[in-house]
Each structure stands twice: as structure tokens, then as C-alpha cells.
Amino acid sequence: GEDVEQSLFLSVREGDSSVINCTYTDSSSTYLYWYKQEPGAGLQLLTYIFSNMDMKQDQRLTVLLNKKDKHLSLRIADTQTGDSAIYFCAEIPTGGGNKLTFGTGTQLKVEL
Amino acid sequence: DAGVIQSPRHEVTEMGQEVTLRCKPISGHNSLFWYRQTMMRGLELLIYFNNNVPIDDSGMPEDRFSAKMPNASFSTLKIQPSEPRDSAVYFCASSLGLAGGQETQYFGPGTRLLVL
């Protein structure tokens, strides 16, 4: 299939690290993205990684890319209640025009 | 920059009525995308434009849906006639371009459509 897969739910305690995982479909995808969607809001671009990189760090966010396994992860350090949201990974597959293919989204719940 | 602007933010209408959703992309962006988000189907790309020209409309569900981009700063998505199954959140996104590092898409806040 052509699905980008994510687990549906993740619950963590405030202050812990969160790791959200994604398996994508096209090993030739040039860019891979993480978007955040808060309740009732639009999609906010969090970060992206170019396919020739293994890791990208941006403040509390760390993106890891394993091209061999087509696995992408987003680590949020020191998770806060404001991080509670749905997180989508997305790719632009080769030959897919400019069609962003989104995962199903992972709902992150941060508990006190 | 104000980001991608969409209007209205919420729309409630009755089945059979015409619905027009509007989008203003980020200034200087040449590519514009329309998505639909539902619980059942997640995020789906409906259509996208580059330099005001529709490039791929294969995601448009049926002939009741149409989209236009008369100029670089404005696009509309129209549903006529609307049906209850069209109820969803419709997002507009824009990017600098389609390749060469310009592909990153920025999303608007969405229009929440409810068709009764």
C-alpha cells in the first residue's frame, strides 16, 4: 500500500521525552515533514529533514531518519502540556508531483 | 507575513446550497494546494496550482467540486450543490514552488464546513 503509518496515540508525563514514530513509503522522498495540529486549529509546520541527513535538531525537537528502514521519528524533549496535539508526518514521494502524503497522525497527550 | 489566510473560518449551510471557500496564499508563493480533512479519510489533497495553473485535480471528489485561481493572491474552492458528506475541514496551503527546496507547504487555519 501507499500508506504513511503512525501509531494513533501516545501518552507521556510532563517533563518526560516523547518519541513519535512514522514509517513512510518512498525511500526516494526528498523531504520529510512533521506537522502539529492543535484542537480546532490548522497544521503548523514543526520541522523537516532533507533525505541526505540522518538527524536534525531544533531546540527541543530532534528528528531522526533511517532511510534503510524508511523510518522517521520525532523526539520532543521536556514535553509540556502545550505539546498536546496531533502530530503528522508527511512525505513527498518521488513521482508524486508535489503531493504531500500524510500519515494518520499521532495524538499526543501530556499528563501532569 | 500574515501566513495563509482562509475565509470563512466556519460555514454552516443546508444541503443543496452552493459553498465558496476562499484562500489567500503567502505573498511570493507560487504554488497553492487545497486539502480536505475528515475523521474517516484523514488529510486528502484535492487540487493544486502552480503559477495560477491547475496541475493536478485528481483528488477532487466529483464534478460538484471546482477550484479556481484567477491571480497569484487568490483562490476559491466551490461546492455546488453541497451534500452532508462534504462536511469536513478544508485547508489551503502554499509553497514557494514545487521543487528545488521550495516544496515546503505552509497551511492556513482551515474552514470548518458543516452541511446539514
Image: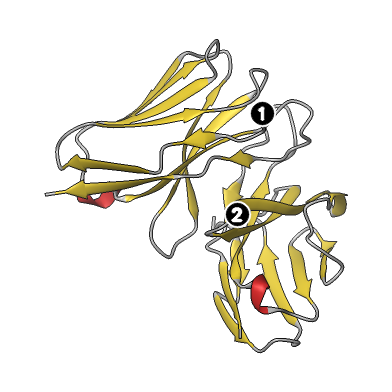
Q: Chain of mark 1?
A: B
Q: Residue at x 79, y 81 (%)?
A: B81
Whether B21 is drawn above or below B98: the answer is below
Residue B26 seen in the current view = no
Measure the alpha-carbon separation of dots 2 and 1: 29 Å
Rendered-image quadrant of the C terminus of chain B: bottom right
State the mark number for residue B67.
none
Disc 2 marks a residue whose amino acid type is Arg
Residue B109 seen in the current view = yes
Give neighbour class at mark 2: few <14, some 14-19, many 20+ (Cα, 10 Å).
few
Q: Secondary structure at mark 1?
A: loop
Which image quadrant is residue A103 in? top right
Rendered-image quadrant of the N terminus of chain B: bottom right
Whether A73 is drawn above or below B65: the answer is above
Q: Residue at x 74, y 39 (%)?
A: B97
Circles 2 and 1: CB atoms closer than 8 Å: no
Whether A44 is drawn above or below B109: the answer is above
Q: Secondary structure at mark 2?
A: loop
Disc 1 marks a residue whose amino acid type is Gly
Circle nearer the N terminus (2, 1): 2
Which image quadrant is residue B12 in? bottom right
On the image, numbered disc 2 is attached to which residue? B41
Give neighbour class at mark 1: few <14, some 14-19, many 20+ (Cα, 10 Å).
few
Q: Residue furthest top?
A: A68
Q: Nearer the viewer, residue A34 or B87?
A: B87
State the mark number for residue B101.
1
x and y percentages locating residue A4 in the rendered image? 57, 34
Q: Chain of mark 2?
A: B
Q: Is residue B17 left or right of residue B13?
A: right
Q: Residue at x 58, y 59 (%)?
A: B37
- How many numbered marks, from 0 up? 2
Q: Residue at x 60, y 52 (%)?
A: B43
